[in-house]
Image (spheres, rainbow, N blue to C red):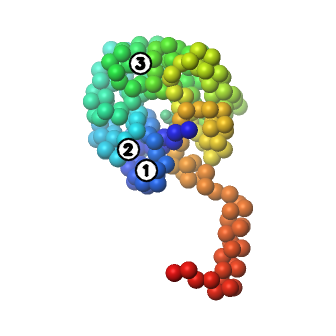
Amino acid sequence: MKFFVDTAEIDQIKELNDLGMVDGVTTNPSLIAKSGRDILEVTKEICSIVSGPVSAEVVALEADDMLAEGRKLAKIADNIAVKVPLTWAGLKTCKTLTDDGIMVNVTLCFSANQALLAAKAGATFISPFIGRLDDLNMDGLELIEDIRTIYDNYGFETNILAASIRTANHMSDCAKIGADVCTAPPNVIKAMANHVLTDKGLAAFMADAEKAGIKIV
Ligand code: E4P
């Protein structure tokens, strides 16, 4: 499973990228706003750090306007994936950009039917939002499972990009189901390393090493 990092914060992207943890980046208008930077400028900088797909989202609602924005975003770098919302205008934009050879990430997916439409429109990525479904006491992971089944039934090549990841367990759960990619905030990726027994075991090893005066360098 590929790891995308869900942020527009350059320092955090660099830190994880240096560790080989970043196969791509996703942003959205909220994350760009949080960075306080110009979308074109910050996206260009991200693309210069990360070689995998970098999602940059349109802000127009009509298909013609979305297309103009998507084409402008795609010019930033070869690894841009234009992110469009799962609306009829977004699907139209997806089809046109895909036909032009541009990667498209269809976002704000909350149902298997929506995922089916995105695949038919040739999306490179479909982004089902797990956390936002869980927030409503719905089952985000079940949606990933359903999309996996549907795409496998018909050989759709659209990548399932599990988004709105809130916990480290979401990552391993998505990997078990067979999501192609998970995009998560940096703190969630880091939290995957945590285990109480690791902390406990390490404390005991350190105490014994000190008692025995073990020195290596
Ligand atoms: C990524 O593509 C999505 O925009 C992001 O994962 C949404 O996450 P949130 O529901 O935590 O805002």
In this view, the mark in front (2 or 3) = 2
Q: Position of residue 149 (x, y in %)?
A: 65, 21
Question: Picture coordinates of residue 16 (x, y %)?
Answer: 46, 52
Asked if disc 2 and disc 3 are in contact, CB closer than 8 Å, the reply is no
* Marks 2 and 1, the one that precedes in the sequence: 1
* Number of numbered discs overlaid on the protein picture: 3
Crowding near the residue tagged with mark 3, few <14, some 14–19, many ≥20 C-alpha atoms within 10 Å: many
Q: Which residue is at a point 45% across and 25% down the rendered structure image? A: 124
Residue 157: x and y in percent read 51, 22
Q: Nearer the viewer, residue 172 or 76?
A: 172
**Residue at the disc numbered 1:** 17
Quadrant in which residue 164 is drawn: top right
Kindly identify the amino acid type of the residue bearing the numbered disc 1: Asn
Above/below status of 207 relative to 128: below
Q: Would the CB of label 3 be found within 8 Å of ligand 1?
A: no
Q: Which mark sits nearer the N-terminus, 2 or 3?
A: 2
Residue ID at (62%, 83%): 214
User: Which of the two discs, 3 and 1, sits closer to the camera?
Assistant: 1
Tell me the residue that label 3 is attached to: 94
Is residue 171 shown above or below 160?
below
The percent position of residue 180, horizontal first and vertical second, equals 55, 32
Q: Which mark is residue 56?
A: none
Q: Can residue 93 be seen in this view?
A: no
- CA distance for labels 2 and 1: 7 Å
Q: How far apart are marks 2 and 3 (CA)?
A: 23 Å
Q: Name the residue under label 2.
A: 50
